[in-house]
Image (tube, helix red, strand yellow):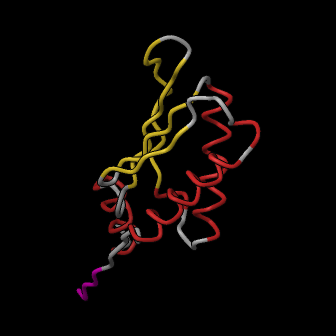
Amino acid sequence: MPSFDTVLETDLVKVKNAVENTGKEIGTRFDFKGTAAKIELKDKEITLTGDGDFQIEQIHDILRNKLTKAGVDVRFLDIGKVEKIGGDKVKQITTVRDGIETEQSNKIMQLFKGN
């Protein structure tokens, strides 16, 4: 039986640029002035911080737009739950993942083998 190997990796340089551009846009937008809105990238974790769920969703929309323009598939993002971090402030951790899960890859292999 022939075999093949595929690699699905996210270009972290493009992700970093998208996060930096999102941070710049947050700094210049009028609706974010005087708020706790910010975005940070550490390894493969993107942390969104804001004053509420709505603001987190706005930051996420900006990030998705920047990633799409950079050619990064947003399906590589695992979006976490919004957590309270004190007072009115909330944060959300989004993880950038590579590849597909083992369970999914096994299903794909079964389809190829025809079992």
Q: Is residue 110 above or below residue 79?
A: below
* Majority secondary structure in the magenta region: loop
Q: Residue at x 57, y 73 (%)?
A: 71
| Residue furthest out toward the right | 30
Residue 63 locus on image (x, y percent): 59, 53
Q: Name the quadrant containing residue 58.
A: top right
Q: Name the quadrant containing residue 97.
A: bottom left
Q: Residue at x 30, y 60 (%)?
A: 106
Q: Residue at x 43, y 46 (%)?
A: 40
What is the magenta range?
A: 1-5
Residue 100 locus on image (x, y percent): 36, 60
Side (left or right) of 73 relative to 54: left
Q: Is residue 5 above or below residue 34?
A: below
> In the depicted view, which residue is nearer to us: 6 or 115?
6
Q: Is residue 111 above or below residue 90?
A: below
Q: Name the quadrant containing residue 115.
A: bottom left
Side (left or right) of 66 relative to 100: right
> In the depicted view, which residue is nearer to us: 78 or 47?
47
Specify the quadrant that holds the N terminus.
bottom left
Q: Residue at x 55, y 51 (%)?
A: 23
| Residue furthest out toward the bottom | 2
| Residue furthest out toward the top | 87
Residue 2 is inside the magenta segment: yes
Residue 111 is inside the magenta segment: no
Residue 37 locus on image (x, y percent): 57, 35
